[in-house]
Structure formats: C-alpha cells, structure tokens
Image (cartoon, grey):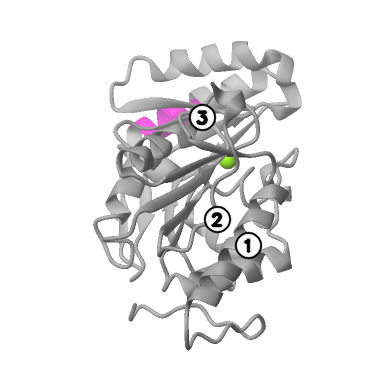
Amino acid sequence: MADVLSVPPLISEPYGFFFDFDGTLAELQPLPDQVALLTERRRLLARLQIISEGAVALISGRSLAELDTLTAPLCFALGGVHGAERRDINGQLSTVTLPPPLMVQLRAQLQALCLRFPGTFLEEKGMAFAVHYRGAEQAGPAVYQATAAIAQPHPELALQPGKCVVEIRPAGVSKGHALAQFLTEPPFKGRRPLFIGDDITDESAFEVVNQRGGISIKVGEGDTLAHYRLNSVTAVYLWLARVVTRLEKASTGVTVKGVGYEPFSGSL
Ligand SMILES: [Mg+2]
C-alpha cells in the first residue's frame, strides 16, 4: 500500500545517488522557467558530490542544457529528456534523435494543438516535445488524447505523461534505462543505486533501483513502485542533510568546502 511507505533509512554506505529535478530537488512552479535551485540546497548537493566521489547524477525530463543552467556552477553526470540524452561523468554525450522531417511534422501538429487549447504551450527539447497544460488543467484529458493521436501513427515515438504535461519523445528511452547505463560506468559502477523522484516518469527508475537492491524514494503522494516516501522537496533536503553529515563523519581526511567549491574534473 502506497500510504504506508516509511521515510528512507539514514544510510552510511557509498551509494550512487540519482535524482529527478522538478518536484524533487526544486518545488514545482506554474511555469518551468520559474523553477530554481536555492543556494543552500546547491551547497548540500556539492557536499554530497564530494563525499560520494562524484557519484551523483540528475535524471530529468529537462534538457542537459537546462539542467546545467539550473545547477551551475556544479557539474553533474546528467540524463536529460527522460534519458534520450545522457552525459557521463567524463562529459561523454550519447543522444537519441528523431528524423528531422518527423520533427518538422510534429512541431506543426503540436503548435496547432496548442492554439486549440488556450493556456497550453509547447516546449521543444531537441528530440522531444512537451505540451504543458498547467494553465488549462480542465482541458488535461482532451490535451492528452489529442497529443496521443498525433503520436499514435509513429512507432518510433512514445508518449510520456507527467504532472500537467504530456510529452512526445523517442521510443525505447526511459529514466530507468539511463540509470542502468550509469551503473555500468565509474563512479557509479559497483555502488547500489538510490533514486528520488516525484512523477510517473520516475517509476521506471524505481523499478531498476528495486531490482538492484537499492533505495527508491517517492516524493509526495500517489501510488508508486518506490519503497520509501518523503512528503515534500523540503523533506528531501532535511533527510539528505542528515545523510551527508553522516557520510562526512564516517569519512576520514575529507575536507568539506561549503564556499568556493569547484566542480569535479573529468579525471574522476
Ligand atoms: Mg519531477
């Protein structure tokens, strides 16, 4: 039962840390570009990055460029657009793309769709499109159906529902797949995974984490495959602060620099 999930344990082992971004590390806002990462939260993530020897990755529906902007000056391993683009800790990129003619067709169809539903807007993500309807929540089911009808004739496309958003992205990519890929590479290889997320798209990552004996944490309400739950973004950071302090205490010879932190280099 989803409602009996407990808060996650305070760990002291070297996990690989994976996070969704929106609704997990930063509160949701009416518009995606209103979301920001608060300074003290960024500092905590920097401490986690140091104490975990770089084994911290963000896996989000946002693009890599957006994630870099939101987390600057930190530099994380990243999975963007639900795993359609991925950057490992050495900066190596891997990207799944769609044929340009199909992108042109989808853009025109989805722009027309947004004109039919006032309050919606279209976001382009390079190899994916997101139709946001937070400004037209009552039209949500109709927006979803219309978007699904556009994707339906194309087997190379997948539909990705989220909170007041429905996306069309390349088929065969998922956050779970991206997380599994990270686990084959340093510095994540050999570590058990921990993933925190809040939305439907995070369930594939929870599934992979559970299969690997890791820790899966759902933020907020809702049915989930996750084994633990934290009630809010604030609760995520309160829990994470205790974990980071615990890991720092367990470590010897590690100096934590809250100010003047420089992103890890590609040498890790
Ligand atoms: Mg989210």
Label 3 crowding class (10 Å Cα cut-off): few <14, some 14-19, many 20+? some
Vertical order, 34 against 120 (above or below): below
Q: Answer above or below: position of 28 versus 131.
A: below
Residue to which mark 2 is pinned: 10
Compared with residue 42, is residue 120 higher up or lower down, i.e. above or below?
A: above
Mark 2 and mark 1 in contact? Answer it, CB < 8 Å: yes
Q: Quadrant of the C terminus?
A: bottom left
Bounds of the magenta span? 102-108
Of callouts 1 and 3, which one flags the residue occurring earlier in the amino acid sequence?
Answer: 3
Task: Tell me where residue 261 appears, x and y as whole percent.
Answer: 59, 82
Q: CA distance from mark 2 to mark 3?
A: 25 Å
From the viewer's perspective, is residue 5 above or below residue 118?
A: below
Q: Mark 3: which secondary structure?
A: helix
Tell me the residue that label 1 is attached to.
242
- Helix, strand or loop: magenta stretch: helix
Nearest the viewer among 66 and 103 is: 66
State the CA–CA distance, disc 1 to disc 3: 27 Å
Is residue 118 among the parts visible in the rendering? Answer: no
- Sequence-wise first label, 2 or 1: 2
Q: Quadrant of ligand 1?
A: top right
Q: On the picture, is 33 further left or further right than 179?
A: right
Q: Which residue is mark 3?
A: 200
Q: Residue at x 50, y 22 (%)?
A: 109
